[in-house]
Amino acid sequence: MAELTQEQARTLADGFFAASKSVGDFRLDHFNEIPDPEQVQLRSLQQALVQKSIDLTAAAIRITLDDLKPTLARIGEVTKQVNEAVEKLTDVRQVIGIATSFVSLGAAIVTGNAVAIAAALGNTATAVEESSAA
C-alpha cells in the first residue's frame, strides 16, 4: 500500500470525524427508540470513529514533520534567537512584534504548508534582526 500524503490523511481524518458526528447525531435523534444495548454499541462506534480521526490527524502531522526535517534546524535556531531577544529587550512593542511573528510561525507549522512556514520563519527572523538593530 502506498504512503498517504498529508492532504490525504487530513481528508480522511475529516471524513472519519464527520462520520462520528453523523453516528452521534443519529443516536441522539433516535435516543428514545433505540434500546440500551444498541445505544452502547452506537456510542462505542462513535468513539472508535473519533479515535480513527485522531489517528489520521496524527499521521498527517507525522508526514508534515517528516517533510519539515530540513527546516526544523532553522526553526530551532530562530526559536533560540527569539528567546534571547525577548530576554534582552526592554521595548514592549518589539517584544509584541517578535511574539506575534512567532505565533504566526507556530500556526503555519500546524497547517503543514511549506510555503507558509518558510514565509513565517522569514518574518520571525526579520523581527528578531530588526529588534537587535534598533
Image: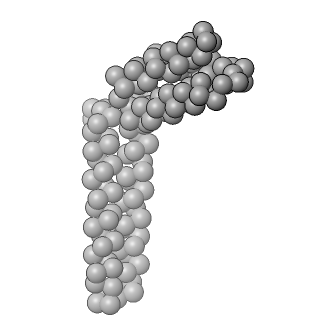
Please give left or right for residue 90 compared with residue 98 in the image.
right
Q: Which residue sits at x=70%, y=24%?
A: 90
**Total label count?**
0
Please give left or right for residue 119 compared with residue 134 in the image.
left
Q: Is residue 59 above or below residue 127?
A: below
Protein image colouring: one colour
**31 vs 129, nearest the viewer:** 129
Q: Which residue sits at x=33%, y=57%?
A: 17
Measuring from the top left, give residue 87's x and y in whole percent.
Answer: 72, 24
Location of residue 89 by image quarter = top right
Location of residue 10 by image quarter = top left
Measuring from the top left, give residue 59's x and y in whole percent.
Answer: 40, 39
**81 vs 38, nearest the viewer:** 81
Measuring from the top left, give residue 33's x and y in whole percent.
Answer: 28, 90
In which quadrant will I find the C terminus? top right
Q: Which residue sits at x=54%, y=27%?
A: 97
The answer to whether one can see residue 85 in this image is yes
The answer to whether one can see residue 114 in this image is no
In which quadrant will I find the N terminus? top left
**105 vs 14, nearest the viewer:** 105
Location of residue 77 by image quarter = top right
Q: Which residue sits at x=38%, y=53%?
A: 52
Measuring from the top left, give residue 73's x and y in whole percent.
Answer: 54, 16
Please give left or right for residue 36 compared with residue 130 in the image.
left
Q: Is residue 5 above or below residue 123?
A: below
Q: Is residue 13 above or below residue 31?
A: above
User: In this view, which residue lies farthest toward the top?
Assistant: 133
